[in-house]
Amino acid sequence: MHAGLVVTAETGKNRRFKATNFYAVKYYKVTTVGCKVAQFEGQQAQTLLEQFGLVDAGSGQPDLCVINTCAVTARATAKTRQTLRALARTYPQAKLAILGCYASLAHDSIRDLPQLALLADHRRGILSTLRRFLAQNIQVHRPAGETLSNITSCASTYIETDSEQNVKDILGSVPIHNYRGRYRAILKVQDGCDAHCTYCLIPKLRPKPCWLPTPQVLAQAEQYIRTGHQEIILSGIFLGGYGKPTARRSRGDQPGEPLAELVRTILALPDLGRLRLSSLEPGDLTPRLLDVIADSDKFANHLHLPLQSGSDVVLRRMGRQYSTDQYRQTLDRVRTRLPDAAVTTDIIVGFPGETQSDFKQTLHLAREVGFAKIHIFPFSPRQGTPAYRWHAERPLPEVVKRRLQQLQELEIALALAFRQRFLGRAVRVLVEKTFRREENTYCLGRADPYFPVRFAGNSDLDNQLVHVRIEQVNPTRLAVSGSLEAVVCA
């Protein structure tokens, strides 16, 4: 132990607890639970920790565990709690820094964790709060030329602030040098949503729509390219809201199409391999944006357009900003400009008030569209949302279970049919892994239309974009998440 700085206790929401000792900290571990945006933020946290002199513990023992959390669904919340308990049990001497949505939603339930060092939610700004915490509580020592960091050992040295941070500054405050461990690099360009779908907590957790200015987006994209990333995935909480002060279409759009112009500018980068968009509302895919992506051979032939339900009655209750006819019209434009595009989607099953007729309409629309993949979610009641109060209208659990099974069976059939369209045809694949099996070397990667591909190759193809011809699609493996779903040869 070393004598440390004394941080005086204060009253009110700005509280800093007295800590008279600190211990040497050198190694950190960052764990992320959640979506692509959360993964990007986890990489930013890792970058920030290393700016303060900490070192990635790898498979060793960390002194500080940073957990970037999720609480959007009940399943994500449960996974976050399990992750916290597992880290505390596995590394009992490590301090815990809890960031993100769960830090806001479950603030009171986790503040008494004995290893807790920091809570930082999005209203206060997770990166600015983490930076302030590190600056106030860590001293860097260099005995015998070695860098060591120090953090207060007081269990209750978390920080709370009154003032909300400007999320625009947070978005670009920690540029990522290298998206480590990934060939496909996520680039968060937008944050926040005020659309207030009746089932969604995001407007409470990330309430302020904002975006990263184009020069900073390009600087991060160019940095990814310099460090060897072949694919960039543009991401945001409400990506279609890039450049707009609100996600509510009823309040009128800003003039121009900032997302289309941003995508056009990124696609013009000379050494870009390919670009993918993480998720768009149907109304975000304007004719201008569709033209921009369709006219570029650098765009991955894939669009994620959440449907949520094929029933207009349910869509209105959800507070979604489109009808099934508008969804169909968007898909008609996609099929005209990008006939081979993979269209993936999200569907919620068992929303309060969903009837068998509503569900049949969902199945019908899914067949009509021919989705390449459906991410299926049972309705997750979240306290604080309007839909949470409609518990009396929820379908019975056995009904929801039966509907889930029906949709899952349809998803498998539609995904297989989509992949079969590419039999005998060439697709572009980013090789993300090479491995040996018996005497052969195989490559595993993801095609432009988003499905994984395995083919015989060599280790020199690692992190390369290659064209391969699909020769076989395995329907039995298709039903297993994360398995090899298509076999091809060069």
Image (cartoon, rainbow, N blue to C red):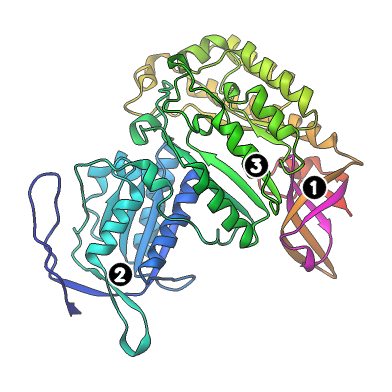
In x, y percent, where is residue 321? 51, 17
Taking the spot 47% from the left edge, 42% from the top edge, the residue there is 213
Tell me the crowding category of disc 3: few under 14, some 14 to 19, or many 20 or more residues within 10 angstroms, Cα based: many
Tell me the crowding category of disc 2: few under 14, some 14 to 19, or many 20 or more residues within 10 angstroms, Cα based: few
Numbered tag placed on residue 287 in the rendering: none
Relative to 432, does residue 72 appear above or below in the rendering? above
In x, y percent, where is residue 194? 39, 26
In x, y percent, where is residue 310? 61, 16
At mark 2, the secondary structure is loop
Name the residue type under label 1: Arg
Relative to 97, does residue 354 appear above or below in the rendering? above
At mark 3, the secondary structure is strand
User: Of discs 1 and 2, which sits in the foreground?
Assistant: 1
Asked if residue 331 shows in the view, the reply is yes
C-alpha gap between disc 3 and disc 1 = 13 Å
Between 104 and 367, the one nearer to me in the picture = 104
Name the residue type under label 2: Gln
The image quarter in which residue 278 lies: top right
Numbered tag placed on residue 93 in the rendering: 2
Q: Is residue 435 left or right of residue 456?
A: left
Label pair 1/2, CB-CB below 8 angstroms = no
Label pair 2/3, CB-CB below 8 angstroms = no
Relative to 189, does residue 311 appear above or below in the rendering? above
Numbered tag placed on residue 276 in the rendering: 3
Tell which circle, 2 or 3, labels the residue nearer the N-terminal end.
2
